[in-house]
Amino acid sequence: MPNAAFTQRTDQIIADLRDSGQLKPFYEIESPMRAVVKIKGKGEVLVLCANNYLGLADHPAVIEAGIQGLRDYGAGTASVRFICGTLDCHRQLEAKIAEFVGTESSLTYVSCWNANEALFPTLVGPEDAILSDELNHASIIDGMKLMAKSVMKKVYKHSDLEQLESQLRETRQHPCRWVVTDGVFSMEGDVAHLPQLVELCQRYEAMLVVDDSHGIGVLGKTGRGTPEHFNLFRKIDVLTGTLGKALGGAAGGYIAASQRAIEVLEQRARPSLFSNALPATVAYSAKKAIEILDSHPEIVAKLHGNVAKFRSGLKKLGFDCHDSPTAIIPIMIGDEAEAIRKSKRLFEMGIMIIGFGFPVVPRGQARLRLQVSAALDDEHIERALDAFAKL
Ligand SMILES: Cc1ncc(COP(=O)(O)O)c(C=O)c1O
């Protein structure tokens, strides 16, 4: 028999979400992730809400590599890394990631969420201080909650460099200061002020951590992410990122850093010690995605071209969208119910785009979040802009 308090509590949560219009529908997709997908009970829709920035999720070579990984190593490792879960394909992928993002070494996890949960409690010492942008991703926030209680934590206002500098001054007595930021902020679609962050961290001898999950594959001429965008390749102490967005879209995450940082993570991080390694099929498909990106930078150029077409088309239609080089275009609506209505209306017109409201974004700042992909052709962009015109 289920516990009565539990039953009452869970029923209440769902009822509250339903009553406030916040209950999320889960659409079932019956095809690979690509520009146009088939949705159960609805038919074909154009996807403008996936993180499939480079359109590699259904690339034939990525699929073939995943199948090869399955053939060569079977379904999974049935072990954590230090027991008998480290396959040679993990090491090959990690060498590729390190080379691609410009660090000495890297270590993979089953998700970037896991990577962030490994990073902070392992590398941040109990006497250290950590300064975090208020709009950092939930996995950074939760990862920091796992640090020793004695770590001094401060949150600075979004990209407020003056406040960050005063926090760096206030924490001088700590043996090591850490500054942590998203490279690309997922709800605003804006980019961290990396040149100033690097300069501040150098001046105050702080370690800089950048989660580039939405930057990798997207920013920079060759898709090496936010550091490349600012000509700061090899200048970031620690990078984390996902393999579940631009780099094949399956799953997986990484920490890329110095050899010594990676060795400590291998030896001490709890997700490394107590959780299974990335399946070989993902190690193969993600490595193939990076190789494709390495040899075809024109995919990144196509993505940037598509972003420019969307931005200028939306502006012409009078939509309020901030300038930014990223593939995330938040279209500000304001009222939450209105954002949800608009996303439903677009869905009826065959365009899949999600409306975000409180608590994901502040009250009164509800928005539609458009995510651009290199998988989109001009015909898709025109179809989407036509639908926006009818809103
Ligand atoms: C900035 C950032 N970090 C981490 C993650 C988590 O990535 P994963 O899906 O690999 O756990 C996301 C996913 O949305 C993200 O946007």
Image: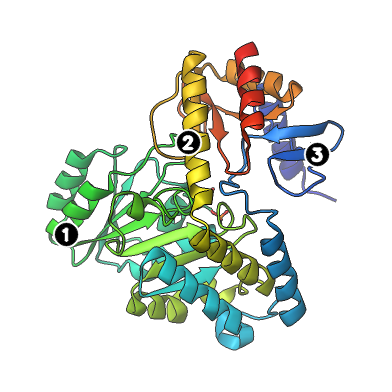
- Check residue 202 in the rendering and tell me which mark sits there, or answer none: 1
From this view, report whether residue 311 is shown above or below residue 201.
above
* Any part of residue 86 in sight: no
Q: Is mark 2 within 8 Å of ligand 1?
A: no
Q: Which residue is mark 2?
A: 187
Kind of residue at badge 2: Met
Give percent across and percent down for residue 225. Answer: 41, 53
Of circles 2 and 3, the one toward us is 3
Q: Is mark 1 within 8 Å of ligand 1?
A: no
Of circles 3 and 1, the one toward us is 3
The Cα atoms of the two marked residues, 1 and 2, are separated by: 28 Å
| Label located before the other in sequence (1 or 2) | 2
Give percent across and percent down for residue 230. Answer: 29, 49
User: Dot 3: few (<14), some (14–19), or many (≥20) neighbours within 10 Å?
Assistant: some
The Cα atoms of the two marked residues, 3 and 1, are separated by: 50 Å
Identity of the residue drawn at 46% across and 54% down: 216
Q: Are marks 3 and 1 in contact (CB under 8 Å)?
A: no
User: Dot 1: few (<14), some (14–19), or many (≥20) neighbours within 10 Å?
Assistant: few
- Check residue 38 in the rendering and tell me which mark sits there, or answer none: 3
Identity of the residue drawn at 63% across and 43% down: 375
Mark 1 secondary-structure assignment: helix
Give percent across and percent down for residue 347. Answer: 72, 25
